[in-house]
Amino acid sequence: MTIASGSRLGPYEVLSPLGAGGMGEVWRARDAKLGRDVAIKVLPDAFITNAERLARFRREAKVLASLNHPHIAAIYGLEESGGVEALVLELVEGETLAERLVRGPLPVEEALEVARQVAEALEAAHERGIVHRDLKPANVKLTPGAQVKVLDFGLAKALSGDVSSPDISTSPTLTAEATQAGVALGTAAYMSPEQARGKPIDKRADVWAFGALLYEMLTERRAFTGETISDTLAAVLKTDPDWEALPPATPAAIRRLLRRCLQKDPSRRLRDVGDARIEIEEAAGEAPSNAARPAPASRRRLLAGLLAGFAIGAVAAGLIVFRLSHGPSGVPMRFVAVTNFSGMEIQPSLSPDGRSVAFVSNRDGVYDIWVGLVTGGRLVRITDDPNVESHPRWSPDGTTIAYARLKDSGFSDIWEVPALGGVSRRVVVDAIEPAWSPDGRSLAYSNPATGTIWSCDASGGNARAVTQQDPIYGSHRQPAFAHDGRRIVFVRRQGGRPGAVPGGGPYGELAVADLATGEVRVLTHDRALAYSPVWSPDDQFLYFASSRGGTINIWKMASDGGEPQQITAGQGDDADLSLSTDGKRLVFSTYRQNINIGMADLETKGQSAGLKWLTSDAARGELAPAFSPDGRRIAYFSNRKGAEREGIWVMDADGANAAPLVVDDYQNVFPRWYADGQALFFRSSDARLGRRGDRFRRVAISGGPPEVVLSEPLGLWVDVDSQGRILGTNAQGRGVIYDPKTKQKRVLEACAGSGFRWSPDGRRIAYIGPPGGLQAGLWVYDFQSAPRQVFSGWLVNFAWAGSEELIYEEGKPDLTALFWSVRPDGSARRRVLLSIRLGGSAWELSPTNIFDVSPDRRRIVIQAREQSEADIGMIENVR
């Protein structure tokens, strides 16, 4: 018999499956009487249908239930309902030792501590006459609190039928899983020689398995192994472990202990596991100070092994190079690759117990929500829909996943689906980026129509605004509830394109909204792109991704503000974060992408066009191309060749002779040509100084040091006209013209928006309209009359094509960039010029798909992602 999610077994509500094996299915359930989660182990039909066997099992289970020890997972009782017989067990959170060993051996000190706690558990059981009989890494749990719990004590004997039978064929793990070679082989690898021969066993069989367990923790390899079960059992009977595989830091006393535990003759084997515990405690106390960590060369080999073992090279452009820092417990942070598939695995969300992760993937050609264990294994696709789906988020009880589903209109709705798949239902209309409240009764989300954060009941009703519209930071994104349920952290992005496809302006700030008072407090004030904030379990800290310093890393800061602390050192292009409820595991997406500059012919007039790539470096990006006035050269910014900060580069219009013009200690971005083509104007910043570090500089094409033209913030995208006048945006989102010659500044009160650009003749300006909603569109101002909206809709970017034509890219929720043409007075009918297939994913389109049109209006040059891939990574022991 079996059970299903949502069913009941006595007072227990079945929630979700935890696993299955020879001893039956295991489910997470909720004890309605005591208000706690438990594990339900459903017994196999073979035992339920045998009345004599079942009676013996019940007698054995009563004995096992008498075990009461902090390192032994407790048996709470037996439950029978509707033909289902099940054990009710203590639910132990965390990973098994088997899952931990996939990532490599344990440091000596850590291995000894785990072994000491296992020995304590065995010692307590042996004193009551109970032998485990099936001790192996899969039956040892490592809890988030660094406590070891041994599972399934005595169940191998209880389930084997005749409790006096020595025949190993009665082992439930071997018989029920004989077709699963990996599992069965794992059990055989820990059998004592007497158990392998089918002889009677006693507590010395557990001593043998304990020695095999400790050996494997230290070496990452099994003490006895073979290609088949028979080969493995033969190794147990005839061969010795490779003692040379033990790490050099292993204390001599532990080496002797292992030999005594793994004596094939039980009469010569260590008789009592309590003696092993004493040996371990004494060895730990006498071990040299470096025993807990390898010498520098060994540490380098260990790091290299971890990197190779998890194909870290495949995510070299992601957040993969970590500082050797320590968490509160002194345990080093570790990187784990959760996925390593071709294509995109993005936007991860950890389940409440930290064992599973939901994420978006296009591995089957369309973007669906998938769920898998963080330790690997089979993945389950829980949605099957051609529409783009994004930002899955687990409900606090782990039964439901909320996500955003794209509509043809460009907006999204929030839907929810059972965590293991099933029928989805719509919860909120026109909403993205769902976030659950701690009690599961509310959802927060970003409203793309208003650019603000809202919340509603879990059913979608009683919607109310959390933040108000902002003329500058008009895109409030990525909300996350504090664990106290009284605050929401979110990202205020400057400008930003609404809609389900992630966008946002070039930089953003973290802010916290108080749900009771409505007060919004800004936490960060630097010109960087901060995003994906998550709260620590005690709400004292926030983790977030940020482009502070020029590359995307993960940072930590106090939730009431202060200087952020960088916790990863590397480079990436995105890092959607999710933190486990115990704060020990942090998952994120690691993008691998090649942002390059391509060129297309505008003469195609409506035909689909491919890009001729002018750059092809696997750098973080070749960005913001701009034609010179004569159309013979292109300026752009890049951190090509691994530069720490962006520099200004120039190349020929055919991509030849690319060379850096400005590379120094500043981030130098968004170059614009002076009218004579002899100099470039660009923005420089020092991320350490925030907005105070902004300055705009001029550099001659012939070379030489740049000179500062202006030292005040004017937005990110700034333009210069033939007279040297600078056009930008002030803090209120109004256009600003600054004349370096006269030092005068003019505020264009009628013009509110972003991305201001001069027409080549200097008679007009164009800009993207006020943020908020899908109708911001394209606006033109001629200094003689009110601004005119020449396009109303979802605008990605635009460029002047001469002084009498504008070309703009209209946003589409697919893989195609559509370019249109319009006259500055809006009188000409818009027409498609060309469509470019950008490739990769629907997330390719963004407000920073910057392009430019050649002076002869025959070519277009654009930054685009030539190829994108992403995987899910995880940091353990987050500090």
Image (cartoon, helix red, strand yellow):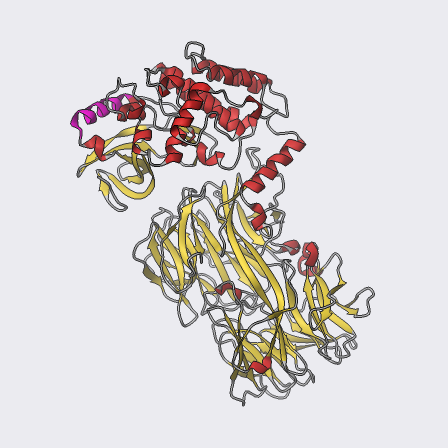
Q: Is residue 319 visible from the viewing direction of this image?
A: no
Furthest-bottom residue in this view: 827
Location of residue 603 with respect to 493 vertically, above or below? below
Please tell me in which quadrant of the rendered image residue 59 appears. top left
Location of residue 735 with respect to 544 vertically, above or below? below
Please tell me in which quadrant of the rendered image residue 618 appears. bottom right
What range is drawn magenta here? 50-63
The secondary structure that most of the magenta stretch takes on is helix
Q: Which residue is at a point 56% across and 53% down the rendered structure image?
A: 545
Q: Residue 624, percent across and down?
A: 64, 68
Q: Which residue is at a point 68% across and 59% down the rendered structure image?
A: 639
Q: How many marks?
A: 0
Q: Residue 471, percent across and down?
A: 55, 70
Q: Which residue is at a point 37% across and 48% down the rendered structure image?
A: 439
Which one is nearer the viewer's eye here, 676 or 210? 210
Which one is nearer the viewer's eye here, 11 or 636? 636
Please tell me in which quadrant of the rendered image residue 659 appears. bottom right
Q: Quadrant of the N terminus?
A: top left
Which one is nearer the viewer's eye here, 413 or 846? 846
Q: Residue 606, percent across and down?
A: 52, 81
In this rendering, position of residue 876 left or right of residue 732: left
Q: Residue 842, percent across and down?
A: 48, 65
Q: Quadrant of the C terminus?
A: top right
